[in-house]
Structures are given as structure tokens and as C-alpha cells.
Image (tube, helix red, strand yellow):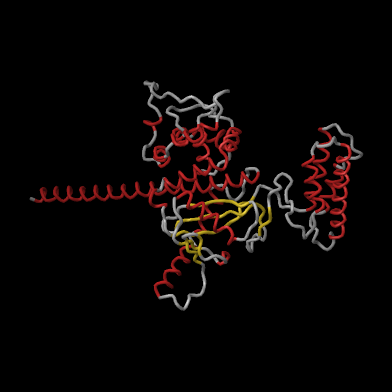
């Protein structure tokens, strides 16, 4: 049920509210006045039932999602640590007076994300683009892909087989099924024996331990498959069988039991040969550096095949296709998508004029600016490791990171404008002071 609107008409007249106490020039204070909160109230109110206990206000939940992404906080850190001691967070969330305690449970953010889904997060992302006005309507964009890594351990067959054995024992205990042996101590020792398997003196022992772990895991899966009632834990057992049957050259491998949709991506990095997560595409305006497109892909597709859906998303969010999209050499394929010309680094054509060659070179040099933006998304906005579950979690996390980048860029631009105005005022006051001193000196000499 949608919560009732808070009545701010009768505030405590003995103490001023947060609006009077806080600095009105603070960037977060200014951002609170620029966001159209009524738009989110109208869009998300239809997702609530007309009966039941009143939920938390929509403005509170949307503001908490924005604060979490902008300041790189987890749900628990935001609710339990930062909310009560940060008055600007409370004012941004629509509170007029200082609040004690927590605004909601940390799990409420999980439920709200699931409620609004990808379409609701896209509306927040679109609002972060519209906030910049004409600066976001760039004719020329840069495009690139990156990897949004999932919160999983580095996958090895031994770890997966040990995890399968532990899961089978846990399921047997829950269903009160007696198994011949749990292998709890044995699997722990065998996993330890698989460490440093490339060492010459440990290679034989490690390989033997890996084979035994797989045998034990298969034995437990088959025993549970016989003894459990039909249909109980069917999905889990099918997943275990897929893991046990996969080989080195198998396609669509399972790298994690709790995140089976994760796939392996090789981007050619020297420091990190393989990354485990999902591929993500980002579109950035070349002149103003605003993210106008952000999406993830459930399959490890070729970079050139990500161009069309990424540019269609840009057209949907901004209202038109850009004139040019500059990409790297990994986007070989199409040279034109709808009204957008694709520019890639290549040898100049014989028919190109000097101006055309210079223009293409300028676009390709400007494309390099997207690399630090990707680094900021990973380091400052929770893209380096995604803790949200499933493919929907990948989409939500990446869209919120792009939204946070746009919101933070607007706040930084505001701070620069205020600093420039302060310098102008300071220079004007210095000039007036100098004139005053010179006039006093003239009076004193005369």
C-alpha cells in the first residue's frame, strides 16, 4: 500500500528545520531541489496495492537508491551508519526535521529494487540525463564495453565439487534423509591438497585429490537423486549434474552455484587474463562527458553486435540517434546504424580530404576519454564488484552506477560554478579595497 504524504505545514516553531539549518549552497542540497520527485511518485505508485500496511514513501526509497550509488555505500552502511549522522542525506530524502534511528530496514531497498525492476531504474537513469539539459544532447558519442564482475570466488573445478558436496549434505539434513557418509572432513582435506597444483612435487597429489573430490560429489548427487521425493530440489540437482559433466572444452560452463548466469570474458588485459561476470556497454557524449547509454548483456557477444542495442537505448532516452559514434577496433562490422555513422581508428581513405582526416582523428583521440569514466564507475560507483543477484541485478547495478555518475557530475559542475562566482566576488572586493586605500592615502597626503 502507498504511504500517506507527510504533512510539513505544522513544524516545530521552537527549533528551525533542516532547510534553515543546512548550507543552501551545498551540492546535495541543490540537487534535492532539481529532481522531480512527483514524477517518481506518479510512475511508481501504480506498483503498490491499495490494501495492506502503508509502505515507506517513494521519495525516501528513490533517494536512498541514489545516495547509495553516488557515495558507493552498501545497503547496510547507508541505513545503519550514514543516515542518522548525515543531515544532508535526510534533507535529500525529504525530511524537514532531524530524524533519530533508521528510516527503514536495509532489506526494504532490496524489495524496492525488485518492485520497480529494470524499467524503474531506467527512469531514474533518464532523469539523471535530463538533469543536464542541452549538455546531454550531444551529436557525437563515444562507445565502449567493459566487464561488470560478479561477487564470486575465482572458479576452479575443485571448489565447485567441494561446494556441491557441502550442499548435498545440507539438503539431506533439511529433508531428514539419511546418507551413507557426509565426507565433511574428507572433502575439506582434499580441497587443501589441491592447492599449488602446478608445483612439481605436489602435482600428482593435487590431481589425485581433484579426482576424488569429483567422485565424492557425484556419489552424493546420485544418492540424493534416488532418496529424495520426486521434484524436491530438482533444479539444484540438475545444476549439480551440469557442473559434474562439464569438461575443459564445454560451452556455457557453470562457474558459480549461486550465480549460474556468470560467464567468462577475456579482454586481453595483462594483469587480469579472465574476468567473471557480464559484459556491459557504455555510451558517453564526447563534448560534455555525460553517460547517455548503459546496458548489460546476458551473453558474451561480440562487441560489434552490442552497437545496435546500445544506440537504440540512447535514442529511447534522449529522443534521437547521435550523428557519429566513435568506437575502438574491436567494433568491426557495420559502418552505419540508423542515422549514426560508426567511426573506428583506421588508415585514412584516399578520397578523404584533409579536413575529414583531421575530423576522424579528433574523434578517435577524444574516444580515449571514455576509459577513465569506466574506471570511475568501477572505483566510485560499485561496478568493480556487483553484489546484486542474477542478471536483473547486473542491469540494475550498472544503470544505477551510470545514474550516480551523472548526478555526481552535475554536483561537481555546480561546485565549480560556485567557486568561480566566489573568485569573482573576491576579486571585486579586493579592487574596492584597493580603491578605498588609495583614496585614504590621497586624503592623508593632502
* Residue 154 location (% of width, % of height): 71, 52
Q: Across the whole image, how many numbered discs are drawn on residues?
A: 0
Outermost residue, right side: 180
Left or right: residue 16 versus residue 53 is left
In the rendered image, the residue lying farthest to the bottom is 350
Residue 184 spot, x, y in % from top left: 85, 42
Residue 187 lies, in percent from the top left, at 84, 46
Task: Give 89 or 232, whichever is nearer the viewer.
Answer: 232
Q: Residue furthest left?
A: 446
Residue at x 72%, y 44% (from the top left corner): 258
Q: Left or right of 225: which side holds 304?
A: left
Task: Look at 49% across and 59% down and name the residue there.
Answer: 338
Which quadrant holds residue 14? top left
Q: Position of residue 24 (x, y in %)?
A: 36, 37
| Above or below for 218 versus 88 | below
The quarter in which the N terminus is drawn is: top right
Q: In this orientation, which residue lies closer to the viewer: 379 or 304?
A: 304
Instruction: Specify whether 340 is left or right of 240.
Output: left
Amino acid at each position: 500500500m502507498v504511504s500517506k504524504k507527510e504533512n510539513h505545514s505544522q513544524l516545530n516553531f521552537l527549533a528551525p528545520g533542516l532547510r534553515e539549518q543546512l548550507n543552501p549552497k551545498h551540492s546535495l542540497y541543490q540537487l534535492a531541489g532539481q529532481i522531480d520527485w512527483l514524477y517518481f511518485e506518479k510512475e511508481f505508485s501504480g506498483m503498490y496495492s491499495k490494501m495492506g500496511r502503508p509502505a515507506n514513501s517513494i521519495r525516501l526509497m528513490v533517494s536512498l537508491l541514489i545516495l547509495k550509488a553516488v557515495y558507493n555505500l552498501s545497503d547496510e552502511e547507508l541505513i545503519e551508519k550514514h543516515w542518522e549522522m548525515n543531515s544532508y542525506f535526510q534533507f535529500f530524502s525529504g525530511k524537514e526535521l532531524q530524524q533519530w534511528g533508521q528510516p527503514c530496514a536495509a532489506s526494504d531497498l532490496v524489495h524496492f529494487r525488485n518492485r520497480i525492476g529494470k524499467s524503474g531504474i531506467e527512469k531514474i537513469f533518464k532523469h539523471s540525463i535530463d538533469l543536464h539539459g542541452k549538455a546531454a544532447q550531444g551529436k557525437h558519442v563515444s562507445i565502449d564495453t567493459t566487464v561488470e564482475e560478479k561477487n564470486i570466488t575465482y572458479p576452479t573445478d575443485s571448489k565447485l565439487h567441494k561446494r556441491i558436496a557441502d550442499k548435498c549434505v545440507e539438503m539431506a539434513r533439511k529433508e531428514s534423509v539419511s546418507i551413507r557418509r557426509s565426507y565433511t572432513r574428507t572433502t575439506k582435506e582434499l580441497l587443501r591438497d589441491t592447492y599449488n597444483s602446478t608445483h612439481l612435487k605436489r602435482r600428482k597429489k593435487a590431481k589425485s585429490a581433484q579426482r576424488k573430490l569429483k567422485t565424492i560429489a557425484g556419489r552424493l548427487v546420485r544418492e540424493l537423486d534416488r532418496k529424495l521425493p520426486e521434484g524436491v530440489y530438482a533444479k539444484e540437482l540438475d545444476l549439480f549434474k551440469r557442473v559434474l559433466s562439464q569438461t575443459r572444452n564445454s560451452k556455457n560452463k557453470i562457474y558459480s552455484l549461486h550465480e549460474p548466469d556468470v560467464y567468462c570474458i577475456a579482454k586481453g588485459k595483462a594483469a587480469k587474463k579472465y574476468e567473471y561476470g557480464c559484459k556491459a556497454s557504455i555510451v558517453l557524449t564526447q563534448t560534455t562527458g555525460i553517460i547517455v547509454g548503459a546496458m548489460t548483456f546476458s551473453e558474451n557477444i561480440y562487441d560489434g553486435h552490442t552497437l545496435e542495442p546500445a544506440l537504440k537505448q540512447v535514442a529511447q532516452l534522449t529522443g534521437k540517434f547521435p550523428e557519429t559514434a566513435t568506437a575502438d577496433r574491436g567494433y568491426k562490422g557495420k559502418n552505419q546504424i540508423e542515422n549514426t555513422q560508426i567511426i573506428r581508428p583506421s588508415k585514412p581513405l584516399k578520397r578523404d580530404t584533409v579536413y575529414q582526416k583531421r575530423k576522424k582523428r579528433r574523434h578517435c583521440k577524444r574516444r580515449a576519454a571514455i576509459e577513465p569514466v569506466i574506471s570511475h564507475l568501477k572505483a566510485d560507483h560499485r561496478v568493480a564488484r556487483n553484489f546484486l543477484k542474477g542478471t536483473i541485478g547486473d542491469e540494475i547495478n550498472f544503470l544505477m552506477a551510470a545514474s550516480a555518475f551523472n548526478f555526481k557530475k552535475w554536483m561537481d559542475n555546480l561546485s565549480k560554478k560556485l567557486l568561480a562566482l566566489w573568485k569573482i566576488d573576491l576579486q571585486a572586493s579586493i579592487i574596492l579595497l584597493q580603491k578605498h586605500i588609495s583614496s585614504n592615502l590621497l586624503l592623508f597626503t593632502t
